Image: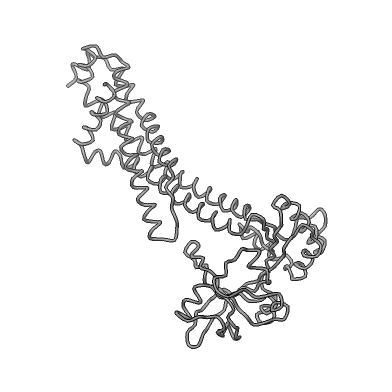
Amino acid sequence: MQFFESVGIALRSLISNKLRSILTLIGMIIGVMTVIAVVSIIAGMNKYVADRISSLGSSTFFVDKFGAIVTDEEFHEALKRKDLTMEDMEAIKENCPLCWKVGARQFTTRKVKYKKDYISDIAVVGATSNFSEIMEFNVENGRSHSDFEDEHNRRVVLIGWEIADKLFSSQDPIGKNIKIGDYYFKVIGVAGKRGNFLGQSQDNFVLIPITTFNKLFGSNQFLLIYVRVEDFSTMQQAQDQARLILRTRRDVQYDKPDDFDISTAESIMNIYRTFTATAFLVMIGISSIALVVGGIVIMNIMLVSVTERTREIGVRKAVGAKKKNILWQFLVEAVTLSLVGGVIGIILGAMIAKIVDIASPLPAAIELWSVIAGVIIATSVGLFFGIFPAMKAAKLDPIACLRYE
């Protein structure tokens, strides 16, 4: 009964002093709101990116010149590396027994035109004929290019869903000729709709044979080699074989690091998680300042409350209340104040995350554990900053309290 009575006293105090209550709770509200909003947005982004990256396949790894570039120094160092070539891809294909399927792709941007309609800055991807198979790329209508078309530099193209929608509207694009840069290509297929990735369309591309790409757009574009293994258990061994082949071809000395990078969907996801974890810690650090400020304000208000209710404390002690009863009463009041701020912060944080999810490309997912963490944080702050006022109230001399004016 004493617990509920103390909660009631705290709530009545909040209601009777609305402005003071708002000023008291604002730090707690901001702190918890920030934690909930940041955790929800980062959790949503992690899930969203994980789903996208998992589509690359757990049995596929990638070889490229740059790898995970974090700093300008690492970027400039990577620029000094030799470019990967189609000969490197062929060497892996021929000499890596565990590399089941090996392919490559290059990339540039050009204007794509059909009759009088055009779209600028379209991703032009030159890839080997097994691109769709290795990358599990969905072709909705028609087909991707064949080995024969790749070997003979054919000007055929698989277009993204958005290209088909914008240039052909209700027409069937199969068999039509489109202009990519200065060259005409015959449309042989349309890719399935992939949607957006962090606000960027994944359907705004054209895919052509890599030999045609090299002939028309130059072979000096950045080359990515992708390798798929038949059995996931041989993934590491296949990477080791590919690494040895490339180190030998590129004359890398045994005591020198690789001058290329090998990555998997899992390693890419780990890099992303490391980045978001850093951002999470920074935001939590900022919100912690608001929580500390909120806690100090609660402690200050509780000290004022102790002063205002000095005679009440004296009366309670005079009729038999013990130190622990007074201590418990003021602790419960401090925790109640803090919890009210925490609950408001949780609601506002969830609302902000939902608004961000709807109004921006950033996804959000409200996690149950973050809500529980918000409640625990609010309770802990109330307990920590309520101890001193509660102890001060419990130690008051009842005679001095009854004489207090």
Q: Quadrant of residue 82?
A: bottom right
Q: Which residue is located at x 53 percent, y 76 percent?
A: 121
Which of 24/371 is in front? 371
Q: How many marks?
A: 0
- The quadrant of the image that shows the C terminus is top left
Residue in the picture at 36% in, 43% down? 346
Which quadrant: the N terminus? top left
Q: Report whether 254 appears left or right of 230.
A: right
Residue in front for this viewpoint, 171 or 392: 171
In the rendered image, the vertical position of residue 32 relative to residue 200, given as above or below: above
Residue in the foreground of this view, choosing between 376 and 188: 188
- Left or right: where does residue 218 sit relative to residue 14? right
| Rendered residue at 47%/52% (across/down) | 44
Whole-percent x and y of residue 81? 73, 65
Q: How is the image coloured?
A: one colour
In terms of depth relative to the viewer, which is nearer, 384 or 139?
A: 139
Quarter of the image for residue 243 reads bottom right
Q: Against 116, is 392 above or below? A: above
Q: Is residue 122 left or right of residue 98?
A: left
Q: Is residue 237 left or right of residue 404?
A: right
Residue 105 in the image: state x and y as whole percent.
66, 70
Could you say where residue 280 lies in the image, as x and y percent from the top left? 49, 47
